[in-house]
Image (tube, rainbow, N blue to C red):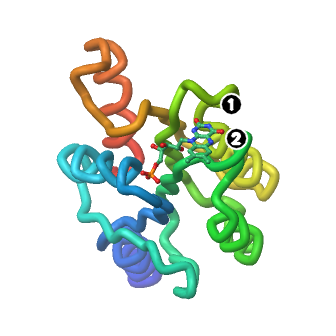
């Protein structure tokens, strides 16, 4: 009994606390989604923009990014993920990104990051792409419900 209780307590400690968001936002557009996540998240968020930091060790995390070049992941974010790829297996990850649909590979970085995460054995809970600055009014009620549901599940 004592053993079972201590196991549960360890689990609780592990799952408590804020959830990390690894964020690459050059001109601030991708960042506009953070208040929406915070509004619907069951936990506080911790935004990580300095990739010199060690990789967060939470079971669940989010990665937000803009897209560069021809559908590319920003170099320093890609390097951060590849450097820490051994940390990814089993993590539950929400991926979001801002892009501009004038480019042929709209939010290509989101797909690139999804590929890296899946290749490394992470569980990608959901991906979400938006045009420039996030505006919930551009979404249908169905899309909005789905997005909020994904955020709630991710932050459970
Ligand atoms: C040189 C350049 C290349 C870009 N390439 C793409 C692209 O391939 N696909 C895309 O969806 N958006 C592309 N974008 C648009 C940015 O991803 C978009 O403006 C995004 O909102 C910037 O986010 P941030 O303000 O968080 O940095 C490009 C922008 C620039 C300046």
Kindly report the distance in space between the C-alpha atoms of the residues bearing marks 2 and 1. 5 Å
Q: Is residue 88 above or below residue 111?
A: below
Crowd band around label 2 with a 10 angstrom C-alpha radius: few (<14), some (14–19), many (20+): some
Q: Which residue is drawn at 40% across and 82% down?
A: 6
In this picture, residue 75 sits left or right of residue 10: right
Q: Name the residue under label 1.
A: 105
Nearer to the camera, 14 or 89: 89
* Helix, strand or loop for disc 1: loop
Circle 2 residue: 71
Where is residue 96 drawn, in percent x and y?
Answer: 49, 44
The percent position of residue 29, horizontal first and vertical second, equals 37, 48
Query: What x and y, as percent, mark residue 130?
Result: 43, 32
Front one among 9 and 125: 125
Mark 2 C-beta to ligand 1 under 8 Å: yes
Callout 2: SS: loop
Q: Name above or below for residue 110 compared with residue 8.
A: above
Quadrant position of the N terminus in the picture: bottom left
The quadrant holding residue 133 is: top left
| Residue at position x 63%, y 66% in the image | 77
For label 1, count other residues whose C-alpha is less than 10 Å away and answer few (under 14), some (14-19) or many (20+): some
Task: Answer whether labels 2 and 1 touch (C-beta < 8 Å).
Answer: yes
Q: Is residue 72 above or below residue 58?
A: above
Direction from residue 5 to residue 22 in the image, left or right: right
Residue situated in front as seen by the camera: 66 or 152: 66
Q: Is mark 1 within 8 Å of ligand 1?
A: yes
């Amino acid at each position: 009994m004592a053993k079972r209780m201590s196991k549960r307590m360890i689990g609780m400690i592990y799952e408590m606390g804020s959830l990390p968001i690894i964020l690459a936002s050059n001109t601030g557009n991708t960042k506009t989604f953070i208040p929406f996540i915070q509004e619907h998240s069951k936990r506080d968020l911790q935004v990580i923009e300095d990739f010199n930091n060690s990789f967060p060790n939470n079971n669940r995390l989010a990665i937000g990014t803009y897209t560069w070049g021809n559908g590319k992941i920003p170099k320093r974010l890609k390097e951060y993920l590849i450097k820490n790829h051994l940390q990814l297996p089993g993590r539950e990850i929400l991926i979001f990104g801002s892009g501009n649909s004038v480019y042929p590979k709209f939010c290509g970085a989101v797909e690139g990051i999804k590929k890296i995460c899946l290749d490394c054995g992470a569980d990608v809970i959901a991906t979400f792409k938006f045009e420039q600055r996030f505006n919930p009014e551009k979404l249908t009620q169905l899309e909005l419900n789905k997005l909020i549901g994904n955020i709630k599940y991710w932050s459970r």
